[in-house]
Image (cartoon, rainbow, N blue to C red):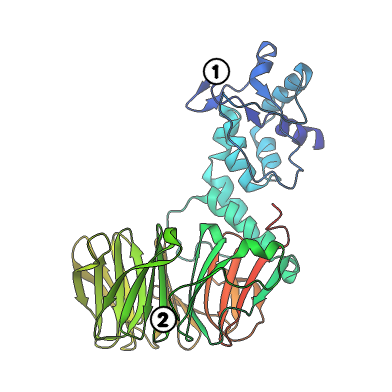
Amino acid sequence: MKSLCQNVGKLSVVNINSPDRKDGVPDSEPPRDQESKCTAMSSMSNPNFGSTTVFTSTEKIELPNVANGDDIVDASELLLLPTELLLKIISFLDAHFAVDVLQHVCKLFNALVKDKYTWKSRVVNQLKNSYPFLSDLEIDWAQACAEIEQHKRMWRNGGKDLHHFSLTKGHFASIVSMVLTENGRICFSGSKDRHVKVWNFSQLATEHDPEPTLSLGKPSAHEGWVSSLAFHDCLLSSASWDHTVKLWDMSANGKQVGEIRTDSFFYCTQFVQDTLVVGSSNHLINLYDVRVSYKEVHSLKHHSKAVICLSADDNYIISSSPDKTLVIYDRVAAKVLHRIRVPSCILSISHLNGELWTGDAIGNVGVLSCKGKCASEMTVCFPTNPLTKLFTIHSTMMSTMSTRTNLLAAGCHEGALDVWVPLNHFSS
């Protein structure tokens, strides 16, 4: 089995401009006289095989293990094995490696990797519970498997493979809003101390408690609590209880470039391309075009009380309120699709890939009309039915959180910003 796995590794990098390739997939057996078109990749036991590089024909490929003619013949014999045995070998490979590299080796591997039932079975065997939570969803099983394995590696061993940083030099009051950008490298935080801070998490590679790299506004960003942050392109919006939403150009070192002022408090904001969607205390959802002097282009009234959280995209605006309603608005049809009565005020909404998840004031987690109980601590779960808990973080009381790839950040009530990342996050 070990020699077979090594042969899989030897077939893993090919010339993507080879004339023998059709639709990006090479023929299954590279002959001896074409060994210049096939180079070798280090064995799949390499712990970093999940990250790959695509080479063009103009690049020089320098790899430590280059296949000779005999290696290619041995590797091509691997393709003569029964399909069941090949699938068994692939099941030992990292999912990211199989999806990103192996399917580009030859037509046979391409067909095996694209078989969704293979990946579905692999996911079920790992989670032991029904996945996804809503069984009628159409999902990319290969990608789902890769993400699940990545999260399991991150949160395994009770969090012992994670670095925990507590950043205490930025705020002196509760952090209530936060945005991560650039794949988690840059963080914006807004607080009850009226400040908006910019953090560069790359500094955590050398400093355990760095100071923020930038503080917006003089002497502070707002004259009231900073309730919500949103980011699009180079533009950061900060909403506050001082009746304003301010726009900051991060490509100009955080220069303020605009302001929206009303008679209401602002609770929540989100960018949908060049449209800023805002929920406020006057029961309204307002839409502003940030390209045209931040002009209001639309206003919606779906609630009898303040709009405290929302999630928006090109098709829907989903909002909640202390009036204990969850409203789903169809932007294309310009009408309310659903108005759902809930037992407790919903404080958090996440809408992605056809799933609508909610978190309410008494600790319940809901998926559309399905509800499950989750611990009051911050708990990392897979969206299975029932929820599969990976790890519970015991920290101080948290008021907001955000995550990107392998990084999790949470704002705490005493003003600290807590960050969890894998031990090798900054060295990779």
Left/right of residue 151 with respect to residue 242 in the rendered view: right
Left/right of residue 148 with respect to residue 250 in the rendered view: right
Helix, strand, or loop for circle 1? loop
Left/right of residue 89 with respect to residue 371 in the rendered view: right
Question: For the residue marked with disc 1, what is the amino acid?
Answer: Asp
Q: Position of residue 149 (x, y in %)?
A: 64, 56
Farthest front residue? 218
Residue 128: in sight, yes or no? no
Q: Is residue 418 above or below residue 181?
A: below
Q: Which mark is residue 20?
A: 1
Front tag of 2 and 1 = 2
Farthest right residue? 2
Q: Position of residue 6 (x, y in %)?
A: 77, 34
Q: Say which residue appears at 66% left-offset and 28% top-offset.
A: 61
How many dots with numbers? 2
Helix, strand, or loop for circle 2? strand
Q: Which mark is residue 227?
A: 2
In which image quadrant can residue 248 be found?
Answer: bottom left
Q: Say which residue appears at 68% left-offset and 17% top-offset.
A: 35
In which image quadrant can residue 33 be found?
Answer: top right
In which image quadrant can residue 10 be found?
Answer: top right
Looking at the picture, tell me which residue is in the foreground, 316 or 295: 295
Question: For the residue marked with disc 2, what is the amino acid?
Answer: Ser
